[in-house]
Amino acid sequence: MSNATETELRAGHSTLGRQVALPVLGLAFLTFLATWATTFQWIDETRTVLGMTVLTLFGVALLLMAAGVAGIGVLSRFGFLDTTPSPTAGLPVGIVFGTLWAFIGMAVSLQYIGNTIVYWGPIAFVLGAVGLLTATLPREDIGSTVPSAVLLAVLGGLIVAGVLDATWVYEAEWTGAIFPGSELIPLLVSVATLLGVWSAGKAKEGFGAQGREVGAFYIIGTVVFSMLSVLALLIWFIVKNGLDTFLTGASLTGGHLNVPFASISFPFIEVPFVTNVTGSLFVETPGVMPAVVGTLWLVFGAVLFAVPLGVGAAVFLTEYADQGRFTQVVEVATNGLWSTPSIVFGLFGLAFLVPRISGGNSIFVGQLVLGFMLLPLVLITSWESIKAVPDEYRDASAALGVSKWQTIRSVVIPAAMPGTITGVILGVGRIAGETAPLLLVFGGAPYPSKSPNVVGQFSFSTEPPFITNQALLEPASALPYQLYATITAGVFPRPEIYSNQEFGWGTALVLLLVVLGLYAIGVASRLYFRRKLHYE
Amino acid sequence: MSSNTVDTDQMDSQLTTSGETAEDIEDAWSDYQFQGEAKLSVEDLDVYYGDEQAIQSVSMNIPEESVTALIGPSGCGKSTFLRCLNRMNDRISSARVEGSVEFDGENIYGGRTNLVELRKRIGMVFQAPNPFPKSIKDNISYGPRKHGDLETGLLPSLLGRDDTAEEMDLVERCLKQAALWDEVNDRLDDNALGLSGGQQQRLCIARCLAVDPDVILMDEPASALDPIATAKIEDLIEQLAEEYTVVVVTHNMQQAARISDQTAVFLTGGELVEYDDTEKIFENPESQRVDDYITGKFG
Ligand SMILES: Nc1ncnc2c1ncn2[C@@H]1O[C@H](COP(=O)(O)OP(=O)(O)OP(=O)(O)O)[C@@H](O)[C@H]1O
Ligand SMILES: [Mg+2]
């Protein structure tokens, strides 16, 4: 309470600090983005903006940041700004700066003096010590601004002065690698801007406890932002490369939606790349439908196999088995199974299941193998979530004269459902994109001319095994399998329509959409069960 | 363990100084005769948690269609004793029960007791409210549904047996009995975890009533309730005693005095010190220790 009023009282005074810190933050953030854009070559580093090359612009930005940050620190130290610094910036900060400076000393002396520890050792040590001491000895407002300002200024100054430019090359003796300036400088600048963000964030709140919190918040925020950007970038990359293929011949109303059991049809979205078969010579636009269907059948079969078995085993292990050595061993074994490489599962399927079940690659064996891979994760997650169901529920149910099995069915399993579904979501994400075992036990022609007709091929008999399904016993194609075949062997049969690359990117985009779709189904059903369990 | 023995010793010496011996007390109430039939008769009951003894050879008869209060200091074994009466102690792996409890003349600790059936007939309300993470309505109809007394949903309605109306009647009746209806009748489909602690406890009572047991065991049913809700629950208990056998644990002396017909006093170490008509216990107990406990000097 008193803290809040104090900040309010002080706000008038520290406005100057804020006014300097905010533009520095903004500038640092923009520079951070620009460095990554340069790294990914969306911005050409030789381009001139405002009469300077992009790299020079980075240098100027760093100098401005350095001036701003150091300015606040110094003004605060001499009492011109009303701030609340601690006596020191603290040892962790000192260690970070010490390490940074030591590393810089090492890298520089390795390049310009030589690969002898006699030279770079002492230099690194001295610079490290200086970094450590300048960060920890002065009061916090100096200790957390000046060291980073010096770093920013040195880097910025070297860039502006033209010592570091696109043609400069870092080529130290100790490594055969060479780092051209055009690539290295953006990276260095982006690290430096992180320091700037941290210092300016602290300065903005007037240092002290609040400053530290905000400084950390900005650093973490920037890192999280970068992570999300990487994810977005990945998706964007696939979409960009795959979209042309994906949209070949697509239109909003060209398709037909047939109403079942009535001869009416409505205009509908048309995406031939998704809905067409791949291998037939008569299709105008070869599509990925057979592979989509193959992938969906694989996932469906694996889930159908693994979920009841996994949940059942989890129920047995928590509710019926004695807790002890046996359950511990099962737990260890399950974790081990989850970490087993998928190609090993594939090999097992090839050596054991294929000869016994289908005599050759088949959808069914693919489903089983992926099911085996999914099983341990489903078992672990549902086990954990059943353990987490409070005993009070079981007691309450027992005291109402309800049998154990009914209690498990109507209280324990519903309460454990969200956790179990989380496991299934994670597992499905893994198996839907799995390629290695499919190569061994599942894949047939990568570009089939028809989708596997599983539904239509069930036939019943009075002799064991009573139900057979010819389609399940035949090989098929799946999206990752098809992608692998296209990219590695480069054998897409209709080069006059799509190149291997185009077809591959299109397949990748569809695979991404299928996985995201499965993910959405999983998340939605988890939400449904959570809603039922909690008051929302 | 050892502290337990010391405690008992101290009590004994206390007893001797107040001029009584254990046998005296034993004699004083062991021929206690209530009116009516015994619904439950407990004979030489010992309960151990591991090596620790929580109940020491307790014998008592609990009459039907009345309220029996169990009082005593915290940790003296009231909940443990109560759990013996519907064999909920079986669910605690370290617990071991010796002796016998007869329910309508049949030993529930004898050979082939059907625990599910037993607990249908001896219901229980726990010390801490424990509603299911389901809707208020489903909490109440849970028991009857699982027993097959209520069938709703798609399949039963296809088979021409849909008890939705019965279910609503049951829910309303039980909630009214537990003095909760007025507060929740407009949100029967909301999750029960959204209720306040006191409301949850009353829901648990309603849930227990829905199964229509013969005996209702209540472990401090009013400990989380405000005076108004407590008064309602006390009314309910007295009203239940016309049809049911109620055994209620309470820390509240006045409450025991108000609602119960007979009172059993447990003291530290898990022994039953005195058991008699409630009036007798509160006005003129045989045992000095019980007198001290009731007047707040000891315990
Ligand atoms: N599950 C258990 N495992 C081991 N010991 C237990 C367990 N439950 C109870 N005890 C022990 O048994 C003794 C009696 O416990 P109990 O819960 O019956 O007391 P209580 O009279 O109900 O007390 P309160 O009034 O505080 O509820 C205590 O010493 C307790 O520590
Ligand atoms: Mg208790």
Image (spheres, rainbow, N blue to C red):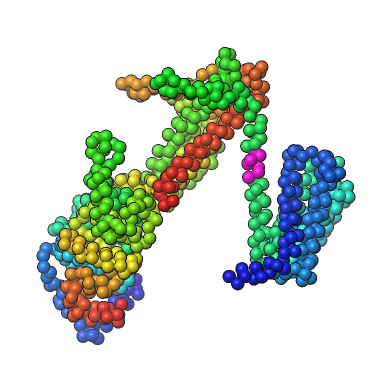
Image position, residue A163 (x, y; %): 88, 48
Front residue (pair A117, B206): B206
Front residue (pair B176, B144): B176
Image position, residue A308 (x, y; %): 40, 38
Identify whether A464 is placed above or below B162.
above
In the rendered structure, the answer to whether residue A170 lies left or right of residue B245 reads right
Identify whether A428 is placed above or below B258.
above
Residue bounds of the magenta highlight: A228-234
Provide the major secondary structure of the magenta segment. Answer: helix
Residue placed at 30% from the left, 82% from the top? B297
Image position, residue A114 (x, y; %): 86, 50
Residue placed at 30% from the left, 73% from the top? B73
Please indicate, yes or no, whether residue A324 appears anywhere in the rendered image.
no
Image position, residue A8 (x, y; %): 65, 68
In the rendered structure, the answer to whether residue A416 lies left or right of residue B214 reads right
| Residue extending farthest top | A282
Residue placed at 22% from the left, 57% from the top? B122
Residue placed at 56% from the left, 26% from the top? A252
* Quadrant where the image shows the N terminus of chain A: bottom right
